[in-house]
Image (cartoon, rainbow, N blue to C red):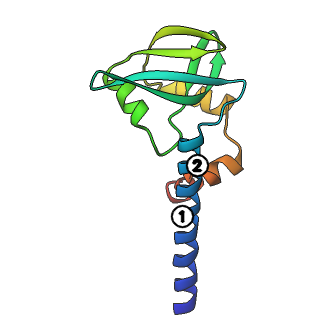
Amino acid sequence: MRILRITLISLLVVYIGLVVLFESWLGYSQPTNTNSLVITTLDSGEPEDRVLSAVNNGGKLYVSANHWPRAWYRQALSNPNVEALYKGEKNSYLAVSVEGEEHDRLMKEHAHPLTFRILTGFFLLDILFV
């Protein structure tokens, strides 16, 4: 029983380490693709840029706070007047949190693949809180 417990704890520590490495790499490299958006939020009056993956659904732009480093998300909620560079155009937007039916619909229509959920640590949360 002790060996099983040590093995499970070791696997959990390794998994958490992999998630931290993956999230750190994403934060450092900020990779882009055709759906990338650069959001500019204000932190104490200073502009902060962050590369995010955007979803254009029904003429609205959505981004997801699905990574652990979420300072941009907190900044956008505390000062919702943000700017975003999307497909070569920079515009002003009002950032709002999406909840309820709209949130559920978007999560269903734009579900993240299992590999993404595993690498970002949310797979573990799914298991623990189901």
Which residue is found at the position 67% from the left and 40% from the top? 112
Residue shown at 58% from the left, 49% from the top: 25
- In the image, residue 21 sits, relative to residue 2, either above or below, namely above
Q: Nearer the viewer, residue 97 or 23?
A: 23
Q: Is residue 127 left or right of residue 48?
A: right
Q: Which residue is mark 2?
A: 25
- In terms of depth relative to the viewer, which is nearer, 100 or 10? 10
- The percent coordinates of residue 64 (x first, y second) are 54, 31
Identified by mark 1, the residue type is: Gly
Q: Say whether disc 1 or disc 2 marks the residue closer to the N-terminus.
A: 1
Quarter of the image for residue 62 reads top right
Q: What is the quadrant of residue 71 in the picture? A: top left
Q: Secondary structure at mark 2?
A: helix
The picture quadrant where one finds residue 121 is bottom right
Position of 28 compared to 42: left or right? right
What is the three-letter code of the residue carrying label 2? Answer: Trp
Give the residue number, with chain letter if any, for mark 1.
17
Q: Residue 111: give x, y in percent of width and height.
A: 67, 36
